[in-house]
Amino acid sequence: MKLTKVAVPLGLAWSSPFCRWQGPLAEMSSVDLAVDVTNRALSGFDTSQVSHVSFGTTVPQPTSFYGVTTITPRLGLEAVTGPTIAQACATSAAVIQSAATQVELGAHGTVLALTTDRTSNGPLMVWSAQGSPGAAPRTEHWVLDPMKWDPNTGGSMLDTAEGVAADEGYTRSEIDEVTLLRYEQYRAAAAGRRDYLVPVHVPGRRGETVVGDDSGVHDTTAEGLAKLSPAQPGGVVTFGSQTHPGDGTAGMVLSTVERARELAAGAGIARVLAVGFARAERARMPKAPVPAARRALADAGLDIGDLHVVTTHNPFAVNDVYFARQTGFPVDKMNPYGCSLVYGHPQGPTGMRAVAELIEALRARGGGRGLFTGCAAGDTAGAVVVEVTE
């Protein structure tokens, strides 16, 4: 989908820290998390300008049936509503597309794209089954079970990574090398994260606890990676070269190009040029970001060689190896702030954080064009193309 009228004012794309599941955000509803961080991210911003909210979440929470209306009144947006969107790990791209469409078509001038999820304490879904012996119910753990079984293929998400690695002949050393690079990039960019990470204030019986940094990031080394056993016998993926579930929230303000320049007050804007989605063959999820990226780039009228920075949602290091090999984009120019492989994967907001990091990386280099792309359950992927200008 090509976009010509939409931009993000620089400074109005943010993320909370991401915390490993069962960590410091485990007891905080993702709805409350989104409200806490968004209010802080929009401090000093006149929220009365926002007339629409696109809200993304994939893990049900208490009261989340009511969707965005559980959030907007607590942001001072009493009369504002909008859709609740879920597309597994591509939710952020879908939310950005939904919000941007409102601006592109002139339905709304300034909109909020907001995502949040808590994989900690994911619900156990129980469905009655009167026809079963003893009327025993059918159950599904909303977070854990989909990782282990895709109803389209009967395989797990890990199977998709090992399948692509086998198809392409990737070695364990290649996978570990890219994994270590991502951790080194993350550590090197520590100071830069302060520009877009918004602390969480977690309520407790003894007062608030402030979570200002990602929690649960491993102190990964080459020696440590080499000692890990494959997650599957004979495989190349270890628990070091795949992501972990997390909790977090992320969002951004989108407006017309003209209005975004006013809101940025001279800081510059990030134009949203295109959003694209694609699907790979069955059981080959890590391949999907490539066709999604190509579709978004084609809509934007660009080629991979026109890009300065790429960020990815890469639940497996296999994803980035495949992307670099297929597109020719240098693997060391991807993910300069780290990625979900390192800081974890809260599902809905993962891509939104990666887009915020993409915007900051382009801003730090003085502008340029960039791409986010990331895979999702069902061998799908979403991609977003942006351009940072004055």
Image (cartoon, helix red, strand yellow):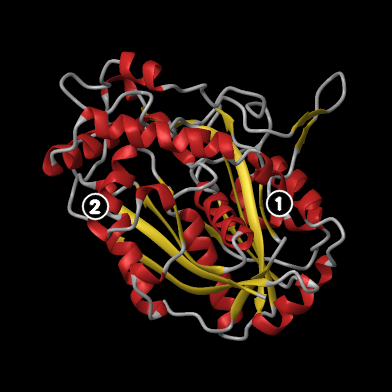
Relative height, residue 124 to residue 387 (above, below):
above
- Quadrant for residue 380, please give it: bottom left
Picture coordinates of residue 331, whole percent (x, y):
36, 48
Q: Is 50 on the left or on the right of 217, as rendered? A: right
Tell me: residue 210, above or below residue 53: above
Q: Residue at x 57, y 34 (%)?
A: 187
Q: Earlier in the sequence, mark 2 or mark 1?
A: 1
**Amino acid at pointer 2:** Arg
Q: Which residue is mark 1?
A: 70
Residue 315 point in image, percent of width and height? 38, 39
Residue at image location 53% in from the left, 33% down from the top: 246
2 or 1: mark nearer the eye:
2
Do we see residue 88 in this rendering?
no
Q: Which mark is residue 288?
A: none
* Mark 1 residue type: Thr
Q: Nearer the viewer, residue 39 or 83?
A: 39
Task: Give the secondary structure at mark 2.
Answer: helix
- In the visual, does 3 lie left or right of 327? right
Where does residue 172 sit, x and y in percent of width and height?
23, 28
Q: Secondary structure at mark 1?
A: helix
The front one of 380 and 341 is: 341
Residue at x 15%, y 21% (from the top left corner): 234
In this rendering, position of residue 181 left or right of residue 148: right
The residue carrying mark 2 is 325
| Looking at the image, residue 314 lies above or below residue 112 | above
